[in-house]
Image (spheres, helix red, strand yellow):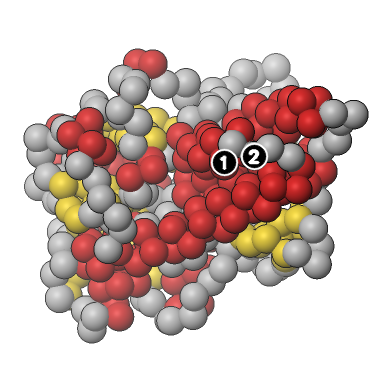
């Protein structure tokens, strides 16, 4: 299977290169980003998306700010970089990896004494985040592959593949690793309304790898579970608190259905997605614009003046989760997120 690289630093550009995910599956295009405004727009438009990928983007964003911000003194320059970091951090509120990546590189920036060293250490740390993410995804894949039967059909929601990370993927990384180990895995990809990340991105990735994938409407999942067509559900996560998993809207209903039909519901995510500082009720769930629901191409689907609710994420209570797959291994109930983070060691 080909290792897809999602975003990376290009020194010849002096900025970030990334796959523009809004154009898939009909067009595969590499975009370039050389200033903070471009990066924030790319994140908000979902050209760059997926929790781990946002962590990498956040890290590279601070490195980009260190390269592009100016000031008459080092203190002025530092304040400009930190303002840029704040803007990146706030560009999407629910996915914790974005702020994690920003904060990790900001910590290195704050230890720098001049602009030259600031540029060097921020880029080095951002590159380290990207490399760590790839190692994490492969480790998650290896741990999670053991959970899947030798022959199985797995349902997934949204896109938690290479496009959502620096490469390989979390939920799809588990599937890729299982297939690489010789298991016969078929994948049912929910289309994931309204932006169709499952239909556009997950199906594109798996078909490219030669992995058996079928796309269904989100509302078909319960029917297939009841008919015995699904052996396991595996999804990624944008934030995991001590009491809930936050993921793309629609995840919660799959978890409820899986519980009812006694189907294991697995979450695959790196430790950087865990947030032991907040409870479910303290997390802001992003709401996106009306146009994503009301307009497809040139056609309006909802009458003018009729309001919409367009939540980007929902939260799944921990009692619906069978196991969480991390780079450190498989964690089963009862989940103690604080203890898990406190004893976490180096990536295998």
Residue 113, image x and y in percent? 68, 37
Residue 73 in the figure: left or right of residue 84: right
> In front: 19, or 316?
19
Q: Is residue 292 left or right of residue 262?
A: right
Please name the residue shown 31% across and 58% down the image: 347
Of the 4 image quadrants, the one containing the C terminus is bottom left
Q: Residues within 10 Å of mark 2 (few under 14, many from 20)?
A: some
Please give the residue where the numbered disc 2 appears in the rendered image.
112
The crowd level at tag 1 (other Cα within 10 Å; few <14, some 14-19, many 20+) is some
Front position in the image: 101 or 210:
101
Residue 345 lies, with reference to residue 283, above or below; the image says below
Q: Residue at x 43, y 58 (%)?
A: 132
Residue beneath disc 1 = 108
Contact between marks 1 and 2 (CB within 8 A): the answer is: yes
Q: Residue furthest right?
A: 72
Residue 111 point in image, percent of width and height? 59, 36
Q: Residue at x 81, y 25 (%)?
A: 76
Tell me the tag on residue 34.
Answer: none
Observer-nearest residue: 253 or 296?
253
């Amino acid at each position: 299977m080909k290792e897809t690289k999602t975003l990376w630093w290009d020194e010849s550009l002096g900025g970030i290169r990334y796959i523009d995910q809004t154009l898939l599956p009909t067009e595969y295009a590499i975009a370039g980003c050389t200033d903070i405004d471009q990066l924030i727009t790319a994140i908000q438009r979902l050209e760059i998306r997926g929790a781990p990928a946002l962590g990498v983007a956040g890290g590279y964003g601070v490195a980009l700010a260190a390269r592009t911000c100016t000031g008459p003194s080092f203190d002025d320059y530092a304040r400009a970089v930190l303002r840029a970091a704040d803007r990146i951090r706030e560009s999407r509120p629910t996915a914790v990896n974005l702020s994690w990546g920003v904060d990790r590189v900001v910590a290195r920036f704050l230890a720098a004494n001049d602009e030259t060293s600031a540029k060097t250490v921020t880029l080095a740390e951002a590159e380290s985040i990207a490399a760590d993410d790839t190692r994490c995804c492969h480790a998650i894949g290896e741990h999670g592959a053991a959970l899947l039967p030798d022959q199985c059909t797995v349902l997934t929601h949204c896109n938690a593949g290479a496009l959502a990370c620096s490469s390989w993927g979390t939920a799809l990384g588990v599937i890729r690793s299982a297939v690489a180990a010789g298991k016969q895995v078929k994948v049912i990809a929910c289309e994931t309304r309204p932006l169709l990340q499952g239909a556009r991105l997950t199906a594109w990735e798996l078909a490219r790898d030669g992995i058996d994938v079928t796309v269904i409407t989100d509302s078909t999942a319960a029917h297939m579970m009841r008919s015995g067509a699904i052996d396991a559900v595996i999804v990624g996560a944008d934030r995991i608190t001590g009491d809930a998993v936050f993921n793309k809207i629609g995840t919660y209903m799959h978890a409820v259905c899986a519980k009812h039909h006694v189907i294991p519901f697995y979450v695959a995510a790196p430790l950087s997605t865990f947030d032991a500082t907040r409870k479910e009720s303290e997390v802001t769930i992003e709401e996106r614009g009306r146009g994503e629901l009301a307009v497809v191409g040139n056609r309006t689907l909802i009458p003018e003046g009729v309001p919409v609710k367009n939540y980007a994420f929902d939260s799944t209570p921990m009692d619906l989760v069978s196991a969480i797959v991390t780079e450190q291994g498989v964690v089963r109930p009862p989940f103690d997120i604080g203890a898990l983070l406190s004893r976490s060691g180096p990536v295998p």
